[in-house]
Amino acid sequence: MKHPIGVFFACLVLAFFGCSSDPEIPEPEAPPPEPAGAEPPAVSAAFENQLLQFLGEGAKTTAMAAQGLPYGDFLKQMVNTRAAYDLVLSIWPGNFAADAKNDFGKAIQGWQLALELWGLRISQGDNPTEPDINGFDQYTTYALKELKFETYGKDYLVADYRGRYYLPFDANIGVLLEVAGKSFDTARARILSALDNQVTDKSDPES
């Protein structure tokens, strides 16, 4: 006579292996579809108003760079542009038009670098020279492909500069202004396109 406990465990073993050889794995559920006709996130009227002011100042800066106005006039305009940029940046929605935001930053950086190079020329400072004399590295980091380089001769007065690459003032001031202007124009087109797809936040007290 078989022991009843042995029979009981044998049945459990058979049941376990008979039922667990090919377990079914449930398929992941598909994410729910987005509701049709959903509106994009809203931007505040305050942001939009400040943005339009910055676009106006940036357009003036681009026009002045193209006209070749004096350093002092361009510097004053750049102060206005930078102030407007800082204000719009302080209230920029975190998830809105990131590409345009980056391009605006590149435009501001390019204008500032152009002013720094321009100031070096006026003060009769040394040209930016490799490896990193007078900001050589920051200029090449910003616009390596567009910049114009020259090389100091082997008999140049300053021995440490001989045979080194440097940035001529006039040519590269123009290059930096051009790169900055293109970045601004690209950003402006992107931001205006993004605004067309936005709705104004009606809860904004300034709207």
Image (spheres, rainbow, N blue to C red):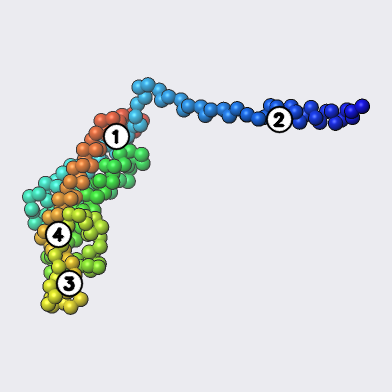
Q: In terms of sequence position, does the residue under pointer 3 or pointer 1 come before the other? A: 1
Find disc 1 in the rendering and name its residue: 45
Front in this rendered view, residue 70 or 109: 109
In the rendering, at what x and y percent does residue 150 appear? 14, 65
Tell me the tag on residue 148. Answer: 4
Q: Cβ–Cβ below 8 Å for labels 1 and 4?
A: no
Q: Amino acid at mark 3?
A: Gly
Q: Which residue is mark 2?
A: 17
- Would you place residue 173 above or below residue 125 in this image? above
User: Quick one: 26 or 115, which is closer to the camera?
Assistant: 26
Specify the quadrant of the image occupied by residue 1: top right
Residue 56 at what x, y percent from top left? 18, 42
SS for callout 4:
loop
Q: Is residue 100 visible?
A: yes
Q: Residues within 10 Å of mark 4 (few under 14, many from 20)?
A: some
Crowd band around label 3 with a 10 angstrom C-alpha radius: few (<14), some (14–19), many (20+) = some
At x 25% / y 68%, what residue is drawn? 131
Give the residue drawn at x 17%, y 47%. Answer: 181
Pointer 2: residues within 10 angstroms few (<14), some, or many (20+)?
few
Callout 1 amino acid:
Ala
Closer to us: 79 or 155: 155
Mark whose residue sits in front, 3 or 2: 2
Residue designated by label 3? 163
